[in-house]
Image (tube, grey):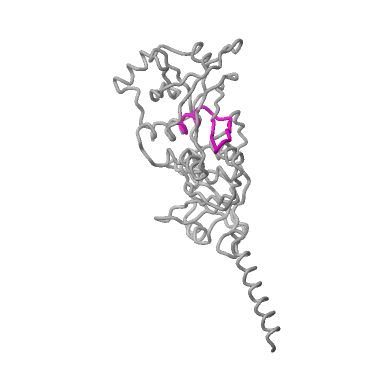
Amino acid sequence: MNSTYRTILCFCCLLLLACADRESSAGPKASQGVVPLSLEDIVANDAGALFAVVETSAGLSFMLPLELCPASAVDLLLEGVYFPRPLTHNLLLAAADSLGIVVRDIVLTLGAEAAPEARVGLVGDGESALMAALGDALALHYASGVPLLATTALVEHFSAVERAPKTVGTPAAFAAARRRARLAQADTTPVEMGVLGLVQSATDLAVVLIDPSQHRAFPVFIGFCQASSIVAILQNEGGPAVRSHQLFVDLLRGQGVSVEYARIVGLHGDTYIGALLLRAGDRSIVLDARPSDAIALALRTGAPVQLARFLLDELGEQAGPYQALFANETGKLVLR
């Protein structure tokens, strides 16, 4: 074999190796230790613990333990419940889309102490990943339609666990706000508000905002999961209650994006309208958001919380009774 043939042969070998490297980095495949999954249902056992029922492409069904808050949202979505405002995970996807980031896939793995965890694959200027709680990952999967995959180790572990029957439903949602505002000649000038804390009535939870004069308070009725997250942030606690919003913050920080403000801008029927302003270099990105999500993200990032002046003027209440509640510690909540 002459030197010319040797050169051609070496070149072909190198080309084949390069192609193999590109194939191996193209994304997860079943042959590389992951299998496709479909999300079938959210169920609960006698103790009220929640589980996701998933099924492999080969028809093997098994259950994965879930956190309360994202599991409740996914369960309602699976049942076809319509939400007039974007959920936390829709807000995260809208932010990613505005930043030119695509969620490529979600891979479920077997983490520490045999607990399921998730890797959210992202593609933007390059490839990156975020680690997420299982419930958040399933909510992102449902909202985006990206492939849901699992490692064979996770499938083998949880397919061997005895399946619990569905005996109870997911927790009921808390009542929405029952207030309306007159929108004619509204002064939408923003007023920067402080967050006094959370209060609870027999049926509702509200985060209480207070104006700079400390004279007027503005309660915003929110759901249990957002209330738990806000309480955890105010009390500087970690854990499952703040994971959804921390995942959002991790995404923004990884892209060098800051939260400029969270703002309540209006009222449509019984629903407050919120907005979140992001700053990405010289770009300003305004996202439609539930006030509860916007407030939780502002608290997590140190951004100001603002309220349209006409809402404060028409629906603001005397701050004294709320201040008295917190002075007596009766208004401070610890939600689990």
Q: Quadrant of residue 193?
A: top left
**Horizontal and vertical percent for residue 149?**
57, 55
Query: Any magenta on residue 285?
Result: yes
Q: Is residue 300 magenta?
A: no
Residue at the spot 70% in from the left edge and 83% down from the top edge: 4
Q: Residue at x 41, y 17 (%)?
A: 212
Q: Position of residue 286 (x, y in %)?
A: 58, 31
The quadrant in which the C terminus is found is top left
Whole-percent x, y for residue 116 in the image = 47, 52
Q: Is residue 226 visible?
A: no
Quadrant of the frame with the N terminus: bottom right
Q: Position of residue 283 (x, y in %)?
A: 58, 35
Q: Is residue 147 above or below residue 273?
A: below
Q: Where is residue 82, by image quadrant?
A: top right
Residue 155 relative to residue 82: left or right:
left
Q: Is residue 162 left or right of residue 267?
A: left
Q: Is residue 334 visible?
A: yes
Which residue is nearer to you in this view: 335 or 243?
A: 243
> Residue 129, relative to residue 311: is it above or below?
below
In the rendered image, the vertical position of residue 17 relative to residue 296, given as above or below: below
* Quadrant hosting residue 303: top left
Q: Residue furthest bottom?
A: 1
| Residue 60 or residue 17, whichever sits in front | 17
Q: Total number of numbered labels?
A: 0
Identity of the residue drawn at 51% across and 38% down: 72
Q: What residue span does the magenta drawing correspond to? A: 277-298
Query: Farthest residue toward the left?
Result: 328
